[in-house]
Image (cartoon, rainbow, N blue to C red):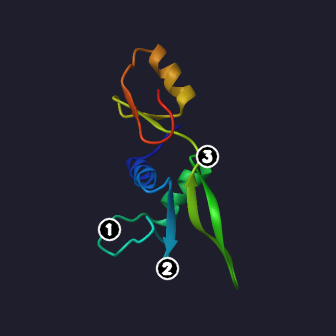
Amino acid sequence: MELSPTMLAAYDLAAKHDNGLVRFPGGYWAQEGWDSHSKWFSTPTIQALVSRGVATYSRWYEGRSRFPIEITLSIAVLHCSCGAALTREEYQEHQKRGHDSAITTNKGTP
C-alpha cells in the first residue's frame, strides 16, 4: 500500500483523535474541535485514504446535496524504518525481506 507523507500525516492525526477526522466548512478535514491554527487536510487527501481502504466515511451531510463529513480509520497501518506504510499482512512479508523494525500508529501490534 502506497501512502504519501501527507496521507500518513492525516492518518496519524486521526489515530491520535479517536481514530477519526471530521469535515469543516470549506472542505477542511481535522480533529473534532479544530481551530484555524491547527493542522488540517484537504478533501483529496481524505479521498485518497478512503480509496485505499485505510479509512471509511462514517457520517454524511444530508441536505440539498449529500457529502461525507466524518471518516473513521478502518485498518492499522504500520510504519517501517525504511519509510514504508504497510498493513499487518504486508508488514509480515516485509519482515521476511529483512526489514524488522516498525511501529504501529493505530490498532494492533506488528
Q: Is residue 46 above or below residue 23?
A: above
Foreground: 42 or 13? Answer: 13
Q: Which image quadrant is residue 28 in?
A: bottom left
* C-alpha distance separating marks 1 and 2: 15 Å
Seen at 46% across and 66% down, the residue is: 42
Q: Neighbour class for label 1 at 10 Å: few (<14), some, many (≥20)? A: few
Foreground: 84 or 61? Answer: 61
Q: Earlier in the sequence, mark 1 or mark 3?
A: 1
| Residue bearing the label numbered 2 | 25
Is 25 positioned to the left or the right of 35 in the image? right
Foreground: 51 or 101? Answer: 101
**Which amino acid type is marked by label 1?**
Ser
| Residue bearing the label numbered 1 | 38
| Residue bearing the label numbered 3 | 53
Q: Position of residue 72 (x, y in %)?
A: 57, 55
Q: Which image quadrant is residue 79 in?
A: top left
Is 48 positioned to the left or the right of 10 in the image? right
Q: Are marks 1 and 2 in contact (CB under 8 Å)?
A: no
Q: Earlier in the sequence, mark 1 or mark 2?
A: 2
Q: Position of residue 62 (x, y in %)?
A: 69, 78
